[in-house]
């Protein structure tokens, strides 16, 4: 058999369009949390801490399902695996219908978990695919292109869903206190029902996307680079994935980074509302944060690796994140909210830089390394939940101190952590 683990250059354009469409799906579904958190807090009568289980339920599925997702892809191949992931996401979206009718928070969380499980399969397939589609030194640029697709969806998704489910939410909150128990339940039921049609549409689009993937020309490729000739001496000598310290440090760094990224997007609406900004205005800030991420992706496409290496871009990103966070913590009002939104700019090149640095030189262990990195997305479950606890016990603003250690770890990985070599067998 000829060595062809990935499509030839002449076949890349079609594959990139398909993977770009998948990244659009990632962004659209992922960043709905920024409006679901305040929405479900009202509709299901939750406290601040409980409302952040929205992020927990969605992102914890990555930690729990990453290894099973790798097994699924080994059994099904890329095309059928991607189709399965999309159909699984559709099932999760459909669960929002009985959850809304019953106004039962655990069923919403189950739907989010299943959506996350489907996304785990898609992420496990698409991220190593796009990294290895070309030379490693330009991997950050290719992922940045995918980030554009992700970011466009992330900007539009909160705006679309927010305009539907958070319409007149401020007036509703103010009026609830003066209603009888029966009238209050009726108003909250009307609010809960607003999510039904949007998630029916999302489920339908996911099914259509699954059919398109199945009928597409996406080649069934061998994702194992063992035959590609890029095994380093250390990857040949190593007997375990745990002998690659740069990967293990990369997993920790990605865990903290995803937590920081999710905090920046998913908490900004609630934070703005907590300082007196109406929800009708606050719902736009998540899109502002992701718009800044889009700007960062464009910078990455232009500058990496032509003018700056990806590890240097990661250093700059970490320092910018610390600066923006400290300004947000030391300022007040709209200025503080704007600098939380600017964390999107600092975060943009972290994922595109950490991922290729972490899997570099893994050789035949690349599949296992990719699964561990996908598991690290679970940071988006843990850190926002910690933020919610800190916000409830202290203040929503002071809870942002949580992101500072994350940026410190990212900076360390950019300077030194990615250079750690594999140990000997």
Image: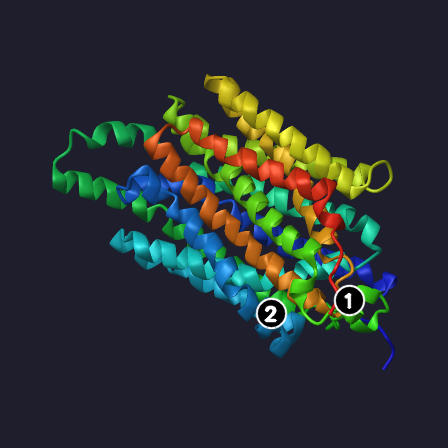
Mark 2 secondary-structure assignment: helix
Residue drawn where x is 73% and y is 56% of the image: 17
Query: On the image, numbered disc 2 is attached to which residue?
Result: 70
Residue drawn at (35%, 45%) of the image: 194
Residue 271 picture location, percent across and down: 42, 29
Q: Is residue 190 left or right of residue 268?
A: left
Q: Earlier in the sequence, mark 2 or mark 1?
A: 2
Outermost residue, front direction?
A: 424
Q: Residue furthest bottom?
A: 1
- Observer able to see residue 304: yes
Q: Quadrant of the C terminus?
A: bottom right
Spot occupied by residue 281 in the image (x, y as percentages of width and height): 45, 26
Please determine whether, in this image, residue 275 is positioned above or below residue 304: above
Left or right: 290, with 183 as reference point: right
Res 305 label: none
Q: Is residue 64 rendered to the left or right of residue 236?
A: left
Q: Is residue 24 above or below residue 166?
A: below
Separation of marks 2 and 1 at Cα, in angstroms: 20 Å
Q: Position of residue 262 (x, y in %)?
A: 52, 42
In the rendered view of the protein, which quadrant contains the N terminus? bottom right
Quadrant position of residue 37: top left
Residue at x 56% of width, y 49% of height: 255
* Label 1 secondary element: helix
Give residue 301's position: percent from left, percent from top.
78, 41
What is the tally of numbered marks visible in this picture? 2
Residue picked out by circle 1: 235
**Could you classify mark 1 by the number of other residues whose Cα lies within 10 Å: few (under 14), some (14-19), or many (20 or more)?**
many
Residue at 73%, 49% (x, y): give it.
Answer: 418
Q: Is residue 292 above or below residue 91?
A: above
Q: Nearer the viewer, residue 367 or 306?
A: 367
Q: On the rendered structure, is 174 left or right of 66?
A: left
């Amino acid at each position: 058999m000829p060595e062809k683990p990935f499509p030839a250059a002449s076949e890349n354009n079609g594959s990139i369009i398909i993977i770009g469409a998948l990244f659009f799906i990632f962004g659209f579904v992922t960043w709905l949390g920024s409006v679901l958190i305040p929405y479900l807090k009202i509709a299901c009568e939750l406290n601040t801490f409980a409302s952040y289980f929205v992020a927990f339920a969605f992102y914890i599925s990555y930690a729990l399902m990453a290894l099973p997702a790798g097994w699924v892809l080994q059994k099904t191949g890329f095309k059928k695996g991607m189709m399965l992931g999309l159909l699984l996401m559709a099932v999760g979206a459909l669960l929002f219908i009985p959850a809304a009718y019953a106004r039962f928070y655990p069923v919403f969380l189950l739907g989010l978990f299943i959506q996350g499980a489907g996304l785990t399969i898609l992420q496990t397939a698409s991220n190593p695919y796009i990294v290895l589609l070309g030379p490693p030194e330009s991997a950050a640029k290719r992922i940045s292109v995918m980030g554009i697709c992700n970011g466009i969806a992330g900007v539009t998704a909160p705006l679309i869903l927010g305009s539907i489910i958070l319409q007149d939410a401020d007036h509703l909150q103010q009026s609830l206190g003066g209603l009888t128990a029966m009238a209050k339940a009726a108003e909250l039921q009307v609010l809960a029902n607003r999510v039904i049609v949007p998630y029916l549409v999302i489920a339908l689009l996911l099914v259509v996307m699954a059919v398109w993937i199945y009928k597409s020309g996406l080649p069934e490729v061998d994702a194992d680079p063992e035959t590609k000739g890029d095994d380093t001496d250390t990857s040949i000598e190593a007997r375990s994935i745990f002998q690659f310290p740069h990967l293990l440090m990369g997993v920790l760094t990605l865990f903290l980074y995803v937590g920081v990224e999710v905090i920046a997007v998913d908490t900004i609406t609630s934070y703005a509302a907590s300082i007196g900004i109406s929800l009708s205005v606050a719902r736009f800030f998540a899109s502002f944060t992701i718009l800044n991420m889009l700007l960062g992706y464009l910078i990455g496409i232009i500058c990496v690796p032509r003018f700056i290496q990806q590890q240097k871009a990661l250093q700059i990103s970490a320092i910018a994140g610390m600066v923006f966070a400290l300004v947000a913590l030391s300022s007040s009002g709209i200025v503080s909210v704007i600098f939380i939104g600017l964390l999107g700019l600092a975060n943009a090149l972290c994922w595109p830089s950490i991922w290729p640095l972490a899997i570099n030189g893994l050789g035949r262990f690349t599949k296992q390394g990719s699964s561990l990195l996908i598991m690290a997305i679970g940071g988006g479950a843990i850190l926002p939940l910690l933020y919610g606890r800190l916000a409830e016990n202290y203040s929503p603003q002071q809870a942002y101190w949580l992101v500072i250690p994350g940026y410190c770890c990212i900076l360390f990985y950019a300077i030194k952590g990615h250079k750690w070599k594999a140990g000997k067998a």
